[in-house]
Every structure is written in C-alpha cells, then in structure tokens.
Image (cartoon, rainbow, N blue to C red):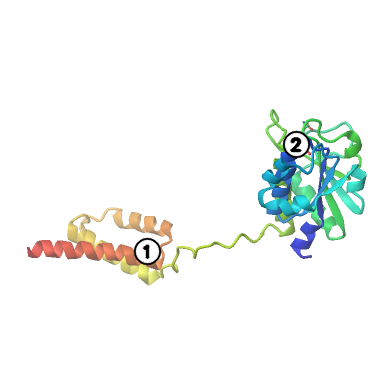
Amino acid sequence: MNPEVLLSRIRVVLCRPSHPGNIGAAARAMKTMGLSRLYLVEPKQFPDPEADTRATGAIDVLAAAQVVPTLKDALAGTSFAVALSARQRDIGPLLGAPRETVARLIGEAGEGEVALVFGNETMGLSNEEILHCQAAVTIPTNPQFSSLNLGSAVQVLCYECRMAAFAERPPIASPLTTPFTSPPATNDEVEGFYAHLEQVMTDTGFFNPAQPGRLLPKLRRLFGRARLERDEINILRGILASTQEKTSHGRKA
Ligand code: SAH
C-alpha cells in the first residue's frame, strides 16, 4: 500500500497534555514525518499561542486536531493502539521495542485506522488508558534518565513510522543545488595521472627510480581511497603541468 496512505491512517493521541508548547512540538514532529491526525484528550490549554509557536510550519496539523473528552473517543474507529510508556506498569501489555511494534502498527494500518497513545508530562499514561491499548512500547534510554520530553517521544515514534511505511527507504528532500561532483575517473585516466605524477616527482628529484621504495604503491593506495573523479584528475594534472612549466622556465633562465 502507498506509504503516504499508511501514514495518514496513524492517529497521534496525546492524553491530558499540560503544556501547549508540547502540543505544538508534537504537531511539528508529526508533519516532518508525514503524519497529520492529531487527537487531544482533555488538553489543559488548547488552542494556545505557545502551541502555534512551537508548531512553526505545522499549524495545519494543529488546526485539524480533534479535541475529545476521553481516550475512548480518540480511539473510536481504530483497530490497533500502541501505548507509549517510559516504564513498565504492573498492569497492561508488556513493553516492546519501538521498531518491532511499529512494524506491526504499519501492518495493521494496511487494514484500517491505528493509534499511538502518549501520556501526560508528569503522570504518564494512567492504567486505565494503557488498558485501552493492545500493545505498549518503551523507547530504550539511559536507565538512569529514561523520560523523554513528550514532543521528542512523538518525534522518535513518527520517525519509526516513516521508516517502516517506506520500507526503510523514505525519499529525501531534493537538494536545492546540483551536487558538486563529476563522473568517476576511468582506469586509464587514473593511470595517466600516476604516470604524470611519477614523471614530475622524478624531474624534481623527489622520487629516485633507482631506489623506488614503497612510494608509488603508497600513493596508489592514497588516491585509490579517494575514488577520484574526472574533474579532480584534471585539477591534479593541471597542478603537475604548471610545476613542469615553472621548472623548465627555471632551467631556461
Ligand atoms: N513521568 C512520566 C513520563 C512522562 S513523559 C512517566 O514516568 O511515565 C510524557 C510521555 O512521553 C509519556 O507518557 C510517554 O507517552 C512518552 N515518553 C517519554 N519517554 C518515553 C520513553 N522512554 N519511552 C516511551 N515513551 C516515552
């Protein structure tokens, strides 16, 4: 199924968010990853200028956000919901890893609507909220400091959703400038350069063909690593030619 359609079927549900700034940050996180369906369960303050500020270009996601009284309302019409929790609860599904669980979520999105459910900034999700979900995920973190900012947690999960929907190969924004490259040099171009370099090094006395040592193989290894392009060969040979010109002028004078 079309990855954009899969992403459009994922609801991001924020349960009782306290800070409007985090709602804006969540909207921005969603839009950067191609998600658009934001649900707010009993937000403390919304709409709010702080939410708009933090959303920057994702005002459309905020404007379309659904404000609902309970999680049950936010999940109406969905067939699979994943709870996000920083710690294992004694109740509710076992905590899984984001990648595996998101793979499952994307699979379910092929059939219908699905949801990612995030908790309040201080309390996290309530047991009752977790029990509305069929799976739970924790983002692996430093065990001594495991709680991400709400907007950051939304970003991590939305990124995983995008990667999964596009089978790990999402398109990237097209570069504004043409890449600064030329075609790779062919073998004979590279060999021509080595011969030219050897000639100049011999002329200057840097290289003594009678006692070659390991200089030439080392230089081959160096330029081999660089994967020379045609333009680069032309530059290097231009430098060599200018050295030859200078030294022959020098000799003439
Ligand atoms: N103090 C709360 C954390 C609140 S952070 C607690 O201990 O539960 C706000 C929300 O961000 C959480 O409810 C959860 O949905 C999400 N979140 C933050 N860190 C997370 C993590 N490491 N793994 C999964 N979700 C996380």
In the rendered image, residue 128, in percent from the top left (x then y), is placed at 91, 36
Q: Is residue 165 visible?
A: yes
In the rendered image, residue 222, in percent from the top left (x then y), is placed at 38, 55
Q: Residue at x 87, y 40 (%)?
A: 93
Q: At label 1, which amino acid type do we have?
A: Glu
In the rendered image, residue 211, in percent from the top left (x then y), is placed at 22, 55
* CA distance separating discs 1 and 2: 54 Å
SS of the residue under disc 1 = helix
Viewer-nearest residue: 64 or 162: 64
Q: Residue at x 66, y 49 (%)?
A: 56
> Which residue of the protein is positioned furthest toward the front in this rendering?
49
> Up-down: is 33 above or below 41?
below
Image quadrant, ligand 1: top right
Residue behind label 1 places its C-beta within 8 angstroms of ligand 1: no
Question: Which residue has dot 1 on it?
Answer: 232
Q: Mark 1, residues whose alpha carbon is within 10 Å: few (<14), some, or many (≥20)?
A: some
SS of the residue under disc 2 = loop
> Which residue of the protein is positioned furthest toward the top in this rendering?
144
In the rendered image, residue 11, in percent from the top left (x then y), is placed at 82, 51
Question: Which residue has dot 2 on it?
Answer: 19
Q: At label 2, which amino acid type do we have?
A: His
Residue behind label 2 places its C-beta within 8 angstroms of ligand 1: no
Q: What is the number of the mark on residue 220?
A: none
Quadrant in which the N terminus is drawn = bottom right
Q: Residue at x 78, y 30 (%)?
A: 122
Cβ–Cβ below 8 Å for labels 1 and 2? no
Q: Mark 2, residues whose alpha carbon is within 10 Å: few (<14), some, or many (≥20)?
A: some
Q: Is residue 137 left or right of residue 70?
A: left
Q: Residue at x 42, y 57 (%)?
A: 226
Quadrant in which the C terminus is drawn = bottom left
> Up-down: is 65 above or below 241?
above
Where, by quadrant of the figure, is residue 156 drawn?
top right
